[in-house]
């Protein structure tokens, strides 16, 4: 092995031009890999960090269902055709969650989408998160910046309107919205039909870190969101009376009630005065309480967001909840933060996959270029290699020599590439990359990205460059092996 290393190093030093060309290609390739992967890893870490800290927690609990269920509802073609499931036996689930030592906090939520109008004017659309302010602020204390007003008081109703939504509505209205103004919210689906609620603006806010999707989210009291989402009591079970209560009412004979229909009616004198609409509604009294479909199901929640004391407990938490759901036969499941975050976070990870595909294409091109350069280099040394074989060097020895030469060059070039990439990342981290538009803000996971050198990107880059070097040396080595020693020696004349 020592002889092979000596020969490989001598060949690298003697063929300076070929070495420089191959080395430069490898250095640029490694630099692109290190910077690119570190860039995407930093962006992905930023997205994960700010979603977990500000919107989703480490994971969420939902009713068991299929499809792309996110914190914003279903994000697939079935969104209008089915309702987000409620968490069964919610009280037991919350009690279990709070009993776990590694659970820091929990926050229940309800979500729906509603059209916003004022009077007869349809103004726009907003995503509504139904929350309990105290619990929401306890779990996400730093994600909301109040511009005007504030959260509604406990026991009351209201909406904290997103500033982006408010500005859109104001462009249609021609005047500014203020706390105390009222808006109409209308939801519609094939499951719950159309529902309308008038809600007072308690305040206007913005998320400290946001994106296109989150800019459409407003925070509303959970009662109104439940109503708009169709989370209402659809029927009432018959009352079960005790024996004492039944005795108090006595036995009622249904037939005796109608023995004499005449007794049910009394003669009345018709008056000539026309009766207006208000009169007839006064006879009906308060009909809202009679509409059983308007009675809120106060135990209904669609999501329970869970934040852990440390991310290292994530798998244990998911396993513990899965066992709990199985043992109690509760039709619920956990979904990680990425599933909860929805399309925008998924888009960033999709862009990372595209980047990796581009890197793969670059690697293939690099293999071809390096291979061609090595073929030329090996061909020029054919006489030298033929002489080595003529004096007893075996095919395996020559093959190892070519491969070791390539790997040695890959290692040296890779080291320089990593150092150059680290220097570039250090400069970018100090300067910071500001998002010039919303697209880059989505990719960056915020308005500014400060990329850091990623250990995984360094390891990945070295693996790639070694693989490239190994593959690139295979074809030149085969050419050498197919050429007889005599021909090789003659080619040098």
Image (tube, rainbow, N blue to C red):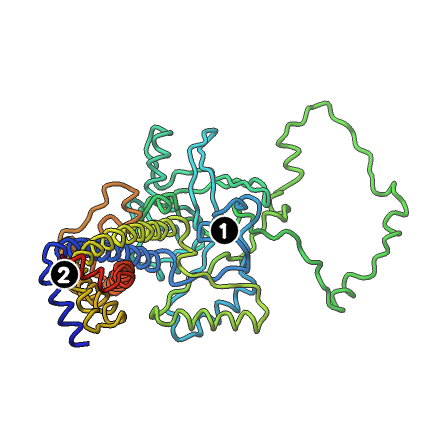
Q: Disc 1 versus disc 2: distance between alpha carbons?
A: 61 Å
Tags 1 and 2 in contact by the CB under 8 Å rule? no
Q: Pick the quarter of the image with the C terminus.
A: bottom left
Residue at point 42%, 61% (across, down): 336
Residue at point 16%, 76% (across, down): 2
Which one is in front, 235 or 475? 475
Which one is in front, 279 or 207? 207
- 436 is higher (above) or lower (below) than 99: above
Horizontal and vertical percent for residue 376? 19, 54
Q: Which residue bears the numbered disc 2? A: 416
Number of numbered markers? 2
Horizontal and vertical percent for residue 374? 21, 56
Q: Determine if residue 88 is in view.
A: yes
Q: Determine if residue 156 is in view.
A: no
- Badge 2 crowding class, 10 Å Cα cut-off, few under 14, some 14 to 19, many 20 or more, is some
Which of the marked residues, 1 or 2, is nearer the chain's N terminus? 1
Mark 1 lies on a secondary structure that is helix
Residue at point 55%, 50% (across, down): 83
Q: Quadrant of residue 135?
A: bottom left
Q: Quadrant of residue 398?
A: bottom left
Q: Which residue bears the numbered disc 1? A: 223
Mark 2 lies on a secondary structure that is helix
- Badge 1 crowding class, 10 Å Cα cut-off, few under 14, some 14 to 19, many 20 or more, is many
Horizontal and vertical percent for residue 177? 34, 36
The circle on residue 366 is none
């Amino acid at each position: 092995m020592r002889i092979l290393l000596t020969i490989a190093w001598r060949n690298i030093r003697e063929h300076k031009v070929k070495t420089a060309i191959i080395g430069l290609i490898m250095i640029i390739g490694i630099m692109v890999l290190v910077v690119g992967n570190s860039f995407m890893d930093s962006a992905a870490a930023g997205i994960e960090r700010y979603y977990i800290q500000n919107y989703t927690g480490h994971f969420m609990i939902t009713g068991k269902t299929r499809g792309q269920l996110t914190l914003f509802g279903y994000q697939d073609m079935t969104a209008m055709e089915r309702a987000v499931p409620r968490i069964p036996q919610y009280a037991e689930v919350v009690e279990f969650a709070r009993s776990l030592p590694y659970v820091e906090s929990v926050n229940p939520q309800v979500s729906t989408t509603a059209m916003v109008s004022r009077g007869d004017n349809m103004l726009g659309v907003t995503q509504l998160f139904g929350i309990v302010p105290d619990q929401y602020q306890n779990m996400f204390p730093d994600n909301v910046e109040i511009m005007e007003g504030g959260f509604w008081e406990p026991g009351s109703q209201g909406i904290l309107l997103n500033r982006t939504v408010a500005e859109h509505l104001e462009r249609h209205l021609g005047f500014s919205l203020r706390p105390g103004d009222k808006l109409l919210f209308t939801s519609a689906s094939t499951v719950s039909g159309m529902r309308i609620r008038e809600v007072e603006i308690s305040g206007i806010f913005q998320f400290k870190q946001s994106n296109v999707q989150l800019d459409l989210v407003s925070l509303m009291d959970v009662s109104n969101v439940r109503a708009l989402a169709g989370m209402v009591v659809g029927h009432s079970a018959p009352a079960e009376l005790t024996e004492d209560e039944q005795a108090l009412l006595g036995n009622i004979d249904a037939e005796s009630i109608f023995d004499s229909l005449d007794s049910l009616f009394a003669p009345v004198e018709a008056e000539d005065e026309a009766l207006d609409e208000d009169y007839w509604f006064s006879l009906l009294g308060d009909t809202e309480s009679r509409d059983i479909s308007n009675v809120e199901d106060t135990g209904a929640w669609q999501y329970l967001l869970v934040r852990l004391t440390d991310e290292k407990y994530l798998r244990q938490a998911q396993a513990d909840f899965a066992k709990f759901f199985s043992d109690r036969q509760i039709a619920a499941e956990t979904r990680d933060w990425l599933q909860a975050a929805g399309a925008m976070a998924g888009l960033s990870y999709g862009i990372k996959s595209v980047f990796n595909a581009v890197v793969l294409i670059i690697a293939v091109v690099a293999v071809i270029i390096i291979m061609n350069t090595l073929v030329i280099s090996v061909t020029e040394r054919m006489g030298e290699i033929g002489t080595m074989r003529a004096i007893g060097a075996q095919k395996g020895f020559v093959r190892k020599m070519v491969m070791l030469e390539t790997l040695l060059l890959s290692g040296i070039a890779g080291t320089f590439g990593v150092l150059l990439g680290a220097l570039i990342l250090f400069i970018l981290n100090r300067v910071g990359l500001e998002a010039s538009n919303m697209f880059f803000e989505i990719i960056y996971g915020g308005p500014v990205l400060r990329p850091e050198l990623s250990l995984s990107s360094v390891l990945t880059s070295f693996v790639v460059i070694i693989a490239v070097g190994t593959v690139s040396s295979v074809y030149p080595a085969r050419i050498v092996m197919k050429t007889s020693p005599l021909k090789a020696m003659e080619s040098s004349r």
